Amino acid sequence: MMKIRTNTRHGMTLVELLVVLGIVSLLAALVLPTVKGLMTDRKTSQSAIVVKNYIEAARARAIGKNRSVAVVLQRVSSRAIFDSATSSYVSGSASRFAAGSRASFSPDTNFIPYNTCIKLSLAEEPLPVTERTLPMGATIIARSPSDGLTPSIPTNYDPLVPLLDMDQGNGIAEVRVFRVTTTANAADLLGEYLVAGNEISLGDSPLRFTIASPTSRKPHDNFASGNPNEIWFSVYNEVGLDGSAETAMRPYVNLTAGGAVSSFRIYQKPKPIYSQALQLPKGTCIDLSLSGFANDRPGLTDYRVRFSSDWVISGTDGIPTPEELRPIYLVFSPDGSFSRIYANEKSVPPAVNPQAVRIDPVEDVFLHIGRIDQVYMPVDTSVGGRNRTALEVAVANGVKQNLTDPSSYVLRISAKSGAITAAPIRQYFPLAGDTLGDIIGKSRLGTYNSTITGQ
């Protein structure tokens, strides 16, 4: 008798399907956070590589074009928009201070936008301005603050940085103030060039002096109303570090007070090239609250966090508005060396308009690269600022921050050679007596004593 075979299909029951979906959901719940963390870690690593390559490209551009090139670190709070109510530019990324209310804000106000950099751009030094490029003649007369010559040096030329500031005294005839006379309106000819941050070389000397005052063209315009064919400026020309602890010791040039110089070169601060901008991967940033120099400097708070907004801020009366915190310029010279930095000076009450000043990088510079949501300011309420105690409390409460996140990176720029290296941060476990600056500094040392990547 022939048997007839029948094909029967067995499908999944509803209960079986629900069980399978439950198992898949459970596995996803267990695995996805790990995968998400790995992807975030990879983004941080990618950001470190991108930033390192970008800075190296800027250094190569300086060598190739034989002129200074800067990498500009733009703070999120520096993204200005036009405010029609006040007819001025204000920050589009950080809240503004209400009129007359600055003193009511604590130092952590706007901390994240102040200290977050997600966009980098390039800036390039224009060709120098010389006496030959001017349509009219100009003569520069060297002056010393104590020379007693006529006309006397103006004492109220610039209220922020007077021409007579930083005079060494002690009988040193320091020539550092200059009077410029022209055959046309001096402010129109040279007003935008002879301002703080730019440099000037005189005669046949290749030595560049950094201009210290005035801080902007405005003092030139005000002074020109009295004598439009005359303006003044001053330079850093100290024998030592008198009055400006951020400029390296400069060779003293024994110029003669009253002597005239007819040939000069004025080198402007690098101008932005916005077509070369770089946006960091989403969710990552350069954490400026941790970034700065290798060592502390007495009398300047903690130089290891030099780029942090709370380094600039000094007391509640000195809190800047978001747009007053300037971008940071890291400048490479035509020979590839790391030559100078432009960043905010320290705001000392009652001053509320921090200026960008030149810094000579006599020490290595460190940039901390991490996550935006981990740019954080642990505040110790007993002192009204961040310190080791606040950090330890935050860590104990499980608050994540880039200093203690092992996926963060540290990028180092050598002050001597301009070489750039990057490595994952190595957590440092503090010893008794270590300050927050010590913890930050020693974590960098641990990073670079352990491994330096070729990324």
Image: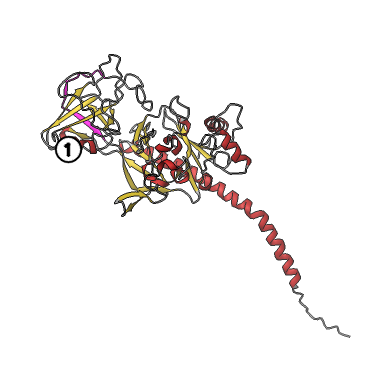
- Which residue shows up at 62% across the image and 44% down it? 398
In the image, farthest residue toward the right: 1
Residue 366 visible to the viewer: no
Give the x, y percent position of residue 13.
75, 73
Q: Give the range drawn in magenta.
A: 253-267
User: Between residues 3 and 185, which one lies in front from this camera angle?
Assistant: 185
**Label 1 element class:** helix
Residue 260 lies in magenta, yes or no? yes
- Residue 439 is situated, as x and y percent measured from the top left of the image, at 55, 32
Q: Name the residue under label 1.
A: 189
Residue 263 quadrant: top left
- 258 over 272 or under it: above or below: above
Where is residue 351 shown, x and y percent of the image? 35, 35
Secondary structure mostly seen in magenta is loop
Q: Height in image: 244 above or below 125?
A: above
Task: In the displayed orientation, state which residue is furthest to the left.
Answer: 183
Q: Quadrant of the N terminus?
A: bottom right
Queried whether the magenta region covers residue 345, the answer comes back as: no
Q: Quadrant of residue 326?
A: top left
Closer to the camera in the image, 6 or 65: 65
Q: Counting other residues with Cα less than 10 Å from the Cα at mark 1, is it few (<14), some (14-19), or many (20 or more)?
A: some
Left or right: residue 280 compared with residue 147: right
For the image, the number of numbered tags is 1
Question: Which of 301/291 is in front?
Answer: 301
Q: Tell me if residue 147 can be seen.
A: yes
Farthest bottom residue? 1
Q: Position of residue 133 (x, y in %)?
A: 16, 36
Say how the picture is coloured: secondary structure
Asked if residue 271 lies left or right of residue 1, the reply is left
User: In the drawing, does residue 414 fall left or right of residue 432?
Assistant: left
Three-letter amino acid code of the residue under disc 1: Leu
